Image: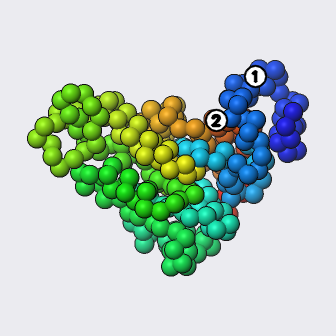
């Protein structure tokens, strides 16, 4: 039994066999054996959280951060980036929800001085222009422009809701200015979203960076992403919850390929320094 820290050991004792087998289900045996070393782990930047997934996110994983508005998705991305910058990682932050200026302001409120990291070339923040037809190509160029250890896409939702084109022979095609030879797939079709996501995930996976993508789910939704497809394509999912009646926040590791992890929702709070386990 791998030591996941005090909290997890207690959980494992308390819980039934059903929970243990659910944990075992997430383990890809070969990958797990080699990734139990800290060398293959990437810190979340949240004190105490890494212990609940055997040392951190498995390197190279794409982790989806899912939650309703205001649950702390952007803050969790900040902490992920900050923890990388502290150890000299090259980081890329793609923002589609808010312009760079606003993002830097939000980060500064939480004591993250990203401007100096931009100035010394360790962090690149890019605002994605969703009106551009060749967005995928742009993203691909940006992602390949540096050897990034950590990438954030905040958020994935507007990107996957863009129009999508497809060539007549059925080959996947990203939106392009040369739409003469293409057939449009309806904007809200599941095929369009799937094509977007598959293409984006492929671009990111090729880089071997550890990646965080956010998705905003509507209040009351039982899906894990706005598009209800992303959750099947990513390697890991953290769900952020907010109980406004009780004034409580929860963080659940819902899925994390290649590692054992805690299953129970954890009590968390957001402070001036970001997320903390309670
Ligand atoms: N200093 C702070 N102390 C406590 N809570 C904070 C602080 N700063 C921000 N928050 C909380 O974080 C929320 C914003 O988090 P954010 O990551 O931007 O949400 P999301 O990206 O999920 O919409 C705010 O609505 C607020 O509840
Ligand atoms: Mg946000």
Q: Quadrant of residue 161?
A: top left
Residue 210: image location, x then y, percent = 58, 50
Residue that appears at 15% across and 46% down: 178
Q: Quadrant of residue 96?
A: bottom left
Residue 15: image location, x then y, percent = 83, 27
Instruction: Please tell me which of labels 2 and 1 falls first in the chain.
Output: 1
Say the numbered circle drawn on residue 21. 1
Residue neighbourhood size for the residue with mark 1, other residues' Cα within 10 Å, grouped as few (<14), some (14–19), many (≥20): few
Q: CA distance from mark 2 to mark 1?
A: 15 Å
Residue 164: image location, x then y, percent = 26, 39
Residue that appears at 64% across and 48% down: 59
Left or right of 100, for residue 62: right
Viewer-proximal residue among 245 and 162: 162
Residue 194: image location, x then y, percent = 37, 33
Left or right of 85, for residue 189: left
Viewer-proximal residue among 233 and 142: 142
Left or right of 139, for residue 112: right
**Residue located farthest toward the left when viewing the structure as drawn:** 180
Kindly state the secondary structure of the residue where label 1 is placed: helix
Residue 70 seen by the camera: no
Residue that appears at 52% across and 56% down: 151
Question: Nearer the observer, disc 2 or disc 1?
Answer: 2
Kindly state the secondary structure of the residue where label 2 is placed: loop
Q: How many marks?
A: 2
Judge: label 1 CB < 8 Å from ligand 1: no
Q: Quadrant of residue 218?
A: top left
Say the numbered circle drawn on residue 40. none
Q: How is the image coloured?
A: rainbow
Give the residue number, with chain letter if any, for mark 2: 257
Left or right of 93, for residue 20: right
Give the quadrant of the N terminus.
Answer: top right
Residue 143 seen by the camera: yes
């Amino acid at each position: 039994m791998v030591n996941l820290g005090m909290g997890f050991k207690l959980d494992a004792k308390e819980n039934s066999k059903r929970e243990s087998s659910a944990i075992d289900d997430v383990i890809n045996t070969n990958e797990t054996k080699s990734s139990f070393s800290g060398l293959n782990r990437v810190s979340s930047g949240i004190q105490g959280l890494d212990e609940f997934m055997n040392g951190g996110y498995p390197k190279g994983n794409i982790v989806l951060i899912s939650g309703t508005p205001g649950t702390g998705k952007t803050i969790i991305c900040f902490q992920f980036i900050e923890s990388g910058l502290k150890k000299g990682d090259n980081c890329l932050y793609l923002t589609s929800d808010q312009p760079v200026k606003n993002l830097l302001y939000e980060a500064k409120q939480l004591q993250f001085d990203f401007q100096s990291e931009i100035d010394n070339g360790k962090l690149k923040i890019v605002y994605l222009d969703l009106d551009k037809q060749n967005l995928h190509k742009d993203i691909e160029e940006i992602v390949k422009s540096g050897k990034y250890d950590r990438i954030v896409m905040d958020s994935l939702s507007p990107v996957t809701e863009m129009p999508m084109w497809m060539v007549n022979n059925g080959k996947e095609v990203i939106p392009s200015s040369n739409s003469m030879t293409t057939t449009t797939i309806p904007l809200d079709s599941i095929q369009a979203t799937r094509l977007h996501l598959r293409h984006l995930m492929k671009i990111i996976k090729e880089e071997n960076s550890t990646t965080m993508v956010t998705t905003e789910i509507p209040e009351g939704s039982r899906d894990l992403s706005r598009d209800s497809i992303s959750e099947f394509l990513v390697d890991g999912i953290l769900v952020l919850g907010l109980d406004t009646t009780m004034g409580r926040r929860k963080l659940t590791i819902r899925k994390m390929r290649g590692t054992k992890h805690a299953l129970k929702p954890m009590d968390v709070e957001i402070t001036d320094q970001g997320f903390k386990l309670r």
